[in-house]
Amino acid sequence: MIIATNNNDKLNEIKKILTGFQIYSLKEKEIYLEISEDQKTFLGNAKKKAIEVYKLAKEETIADDSGLCINCLNGFPGVMTHRFLGKNVNDRIKNEYLINKVNKYNDRSAKVICDLVYYNGKDIIISEGVINGFIAKSPKGCNGFGFDEIFELPNGLTLAELTPDEKNQLSARAFALKNLKKKLQI
């Protein structure tokens, strides 16, 4: 099964959770493709990626799209999480921008949504994972990637303060993958 991503951190998380399945990266399958995430929803982007990769490889494909939705910012950055300040802006700059925006409000609540799509040429299987938390007052932790250093769980730790194994027990992607794994074994 091909994972439709060029993000090695995401790929490693997926491989650790989807045990029992033969997983390949785009690179391992010599697929060099950048798919524009231009849909209005996480599910739309995931579905688009899964179908596009399947068309090229003719192999089972899993694609995801995920992001951070901040309540006081009306769900921003949402589907634009990875590119709201531009494609080549590093995570720390994006995270500090979000902290500064949220600091203007009393409400720091947020959620992470991960939508996964499995496609085998005829069946589309959808799975979603959501976790609720808060935007930290400053970046904390050195594990993880993306917004992990500013997404604070109800226990006060950010995702970046967790070990990879701990994160793989309670991240939105972990919940979506575990649900998808159950659906695929039926």
Image: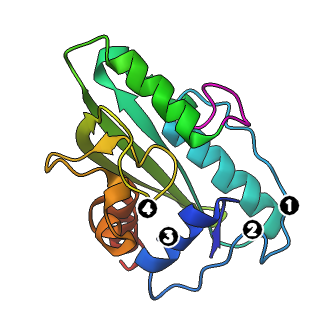
Mark 1 or mark 4: name the one nearer the start of the chain: 1
At mark 2, the secondary structure is: loop
Question: For the point 35% across and 77% down, which residue is it?
Answer: 186
Asked whether, in this view, residue 140 is left or right of residue 133, the answer is right
Distance CA(mark 3)–CA(mark 4)? 16 Å
Eye-nearest disc, 3 or 4 = 4
Q: Marks 1 and 2, Cα distance to the nearest angstrom?
A: 7 Å
At a point 66% along the width and 60% down the height, the residue shown is 4
Amino acid type, mark 3: Ile
Label 1: element kind: loop
Residue at image mark 1:
32
User: Residue 175, percent across and down?
Assistant: 31, 60
Disc 4 marks which residue? 143
What secondary structure is found at the residue carrying circle 4? loop
Tell me how far mark 1 sits from mark 4, CA to CA: 28 Å
Look at the image and say whether residue 150 sits in the magenta stretch.
no
Asked if residue 78 can be seen in this view, the reply is no
The answer to whether mark 1 and mark 2 are in CB contact below 8 A is yes
Q: What range of the chain is rendered magenta? A: 81-89
Quarter of the image with the N terminus is bottom right
* Residue 90 x %, y %: 64, 40
- Alpha carbons under labels 2 and 3: distance apart: 13 Å
First-in-chain label (4 vs 2): 2
Instruction: Say which of 167 and 27 sits in front.
Output: 167
Residue 139 position in % (x across, y down): 39, 41
Q: Which callout, 3 or 1, points at the residue further toward the start of the chain?
A: 3
| Residue at image mark 2 | 26
